[in-house]
Amino acid sequence: MSADRTSPVAVSSGTVPTDGTSPVGGPPAPEPALAELVRADGAVSGPARAAEFRAFLEADGGVMHRDGGPRHLTASAIVVDRGGDHVALVWHRKGRFWVQPGGHVDSDETSFEQAARREVAEEIGLEGLERVGHGPAMLHRHGLDAAFGRCAEHWDVQFLLRAQAPAAELPLRVSEESGKVRWFPWPLRGAGPARDTDALPPGTVPDLPATLDLLAPYLARRSG
């Protein structure tokens, strides 16, 4: 997956880095990926962030992949069980934190959702999940520490995916990359739609509780 989020990178609407760390020009952006970023106007991160991500990809389609430069796009998924009462996290060995499953887009992939679903299947062993909403649920940009080598910054396209059974009926599978995988409680706070993130484990990537706080009403509006 992604990054050291202890030092989030500020995002200014409508701008694309031009300091030489990301390429200018290059292969065209894949149409499926651009269409997903159009639908990301409805994400909890808002239409301004979606416009920035589109501009970044339109400037050079190569940034969709790891070899597109130190700053590039990635894909991940917040995976919840049927009731939305649990969220699946993986222990990222390189980053040393708990985080949602996700990672780089493979060279033959043209869709962020395709990449996110593959990562979910590889990292926690779940397939056939329902996408909540019409497209990405969150767009998040964050800097990376030295443990991530040539990757300096990830522009992460995040989906909200829902399983069709409760967590108790869905054992998760450990992968080579993820030393541990586990469902953690994400219960309603009172009558909702807000949900409680107090049960997230120590070492959870710092931005995840805030993301879950934004996604709780997003999930509630699309449930029932």
Image: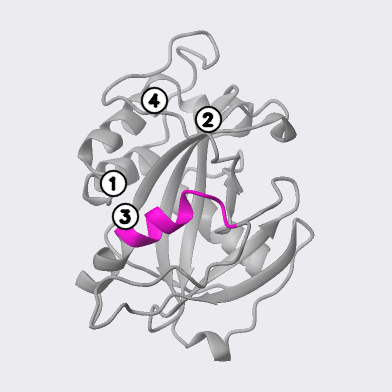
Q: Quadrant of residue 10?
A: top left
Q: Are marks 3 and 1 in contact (CB under 8 Å)?
A: yes
Q: Quadrant of the C terminus?
A: bottom left
Q: Earlier in the sequence, mark 3 or mark 1?
A: 1
Looking at the image, is mark 4 or mark 1 earlier in the sequence?
1
Looking at the picture, which amino acid does disc 3 mark? Answer: Gly
Residue type at the position of mark 1 = Ala
Is 42 left or right of 64, judged from the image as shown? left
User: For mark 3, what is the residue?
Assistant: 135
Residue type at tag 4 = Phe
| Magenta stretch contains residue 59 | no
User: Contact, CB < 8 Å: mark 4 with mark 3?
Assistant: no
Relative image position of residue 5 (x, y in whole percent): 54, 41
Which segment is the magenta one? 204-214
Pointer 1: what residue? Answer: 40
Distance in Å between CA atoms under marks 2 and 1: 17 Å
Query: Tag 2 or tag 3, which sits nearer the N-term?
Result: 2
**Which callout, 4 or 3, points at the residue further toward the start of the chain?**
4
